[in-house]
């Protein structure tokens, strides 16, 4: 019975850590959608 409690605690900790660190939703390679591409800025300035 004691082993089941430890296993449950470890699994709960792993699940919580996965949710906290895995679901941040920030992709560093993706450009910011609020910024205009540089080609459009050059066309609009003329």
Image: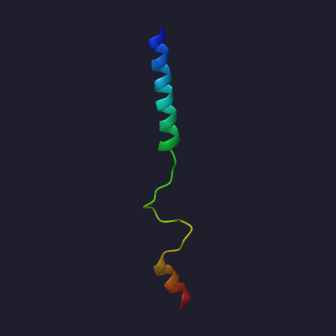
Answer above or below: position of 4 versus 41. above
- Which residue occupies the foreground of this view, 43 or 6? 6
- Residue at 46%, 56% (x, y): give it: 27
Answer above or below: position of 3 versus 25. above
| Farthest top residue in view | 1
Which percent across, then down, holds residue 29?
42, 61
Which percent across, then down, holds residue 11?
46, 25
Which percent across, then down, holds residue 35?
54, 71
14 horizontally vs 45: left or right:
left
| Farthest left residue in view | 29
- Residue at 48%, 31% (x, y): give it: 15
Q: How many marks?
A: 0
Answer above or below: position of 35 versus 21. below
Which percent across, then down, holds residue 30?
45, 62
| Farthest bottom residue in view | 46
- Which residue occupies the foreground of this view, 11 or 42? 11
- Residue at 48%, 75% (x, y): give it: 37
Answer above or below: position of 25 versus 4. below
Q: How is the image coloured?
A: rainbow
């Amino acid at each position: 019975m004691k082993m089941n409690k430890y296993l449950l605690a470890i699994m709960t900790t792993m699940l919580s850590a996965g949710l906290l660190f895995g679901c941040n939703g920030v992709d560093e390679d993706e450009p910011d959608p609020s910024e205009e591409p540089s080609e459009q800025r050059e066309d609009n300035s003329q």
